[in-house]
Image: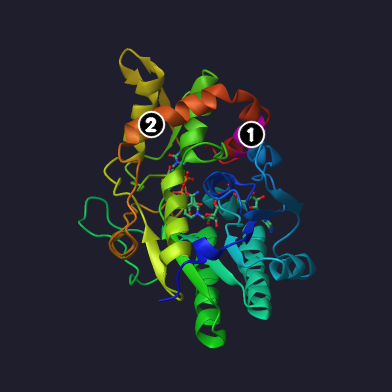
Amino acid sequence: MHALDWETMRRLLVTGGAGFIGANFVRLVAQQRPEVEITVLDKLTYAGNRANLDGVDAELVVGDVADERVVDKLVSQADTVVHFAAESHNDNSLRDPSPFLHTNIMGTFVLLEACRRHDVRLHHVSTDEVFGDLEIGADTYFTEETPYNPSSPYSATKAGSDHLVRAWVRSFGLRATISNCSNNYGPYQHIEKFIPRQITNLLLGQPAKLYGTGEQVRDWIHVDDHNEAVLAILDRGRIGETYNIGADQEDTNNRQVIEMICELMGATDDGQARFEHVADRPGHDQRYAMDANKLRRELGWSPRYTDLREGLAATIEWYRAHEEWWRAGKEEVEANYAKQGQ
Ligand code: NAD
Ligand code: DAU
């Protein structure tokens, strides 16, 4: 058992640390372990935002995770790397897969090579989407042994990145772990994503937008619970292992999530939630559901946010209070969706 990286960690490099989950992770580490020196490597794509790190004691290096020169230098100065950087949105990957190949595959490869050269511990953050999807209503879950079967260019490139990490562990003895997590929600999530898109539409008096019939099911987890699990893996995870992360919240379909948000925001007309049906996503994954028992059993992790309604209410309040954070980008995001009839 290799362990206690979290305890011995002093110089932490976080790729993608100006994005949604990465920035929440940096905030959590800065709060829990102020003695850790945190460096963020982020390209500040449309999804990255300097303001996500406002008030946090971390150095931001603006650069590309696929840039060998930058990555080699930063990795040589770190003892631990947590790899969040990715192109992360399925709908964008259907419009143009190319940046997904660059960042998710080439970026991970460049990072792996640098970690190998400098013998640095790596945690790779991945997704439940690598497993494909499950039948709605079935009593089935993704485990760490479920065969990979990705559906979109996004999930295919994440699956590829996971395979690279495993190969580097086995062939080169790299000290790495992987986590595959379900759908996150919480503060600082980009407004292209399902929950913040609906909240910000409703705040602007626009209807929420539901793809197709909205029967699809996601296994929602609060971003802080995801990041606490990553810390548990850094602390107590076994090198070479993969851990599923999920909070057992796959009993609400997309339509019901929208209805809950509308109800919490008072956005109803004659008792009906204020939403409209828009074009469905091609190849839309039907259901995700995670079996996170290995993480719970081996590492003693459990989620703090177990009531989706409460988590959504807090998230709605965050977006209400941070209009300056999301307002400027809203028109562009909606114009892109409108081109797809969404
Ligand atoms: P995000 O899109 O909000 O943030 C991604 C960050 O990576 C941004 O700050 C962006 O600027 C940066 N980035 C993109 N390309 C880069 C490059 N070439 N070099 C350096 N930085 C680059 O994504 P997120 O939702 O925070 O997801 C973070 C990670 O977690 C991703 O690896 C994603 O696959 C994984 N994940 C996300 C979820 C989810 O529900 N959002 C669930 C499971 C796993
Ligand atoms: O499961 C983990 C994955 O969750 C992560 O790997 C991805 O990075 C993250 O984006 C997320 O992927 P999804 O495709 O599940 O999330 P998204 O927020 O795009 O959509 C959630 C569901 O809501 C999905 O079934 C599509 C639907 N949807 C989405 C949008 C943006 C709508 O009905 N309306 C919308 O406007």
> Does residue 220 appear to the left or right of 79 in the view shown?
left
Residue 304's tag is: none
Q: Give the main secondary structure of the magenta stretch.
A: helix
Q: Position of residue 282 (x, y in %)?
A: 47, 51
Q: Give residue 255's quadrant in the image.
A: top left
Q: Residue furthest bottom?
A: 171
How crowded pointer 1 is (Cα within 10 Å; few <14, some 14-19, many 20+) is rated as few
Task: Determine whether the beta carbon of the residue marked 2 sits less than 8 angstroms from the nearest atom of ligand 2.
Answer: yes
Residue 129 visible in the picture: no
Q: Which residues are magenta?
A: 329-336
Front disc: 1 or 2: 2
Q: Residue furthest top?
A: 270
SS for dot 1? helix
Q: Residue furthest right?
A: 69
Q: Which residue is mark 2?
A: 258
Q: Which amino acid, mark 2?
A: Ile
Against 183, is 12 above or below? Answer: below
Residue 141 visible in the picture: yes
Q: Position of residue 138 (x, y in %)?
A: 21, 55
Q: Which residue is mark 1?
A: 335
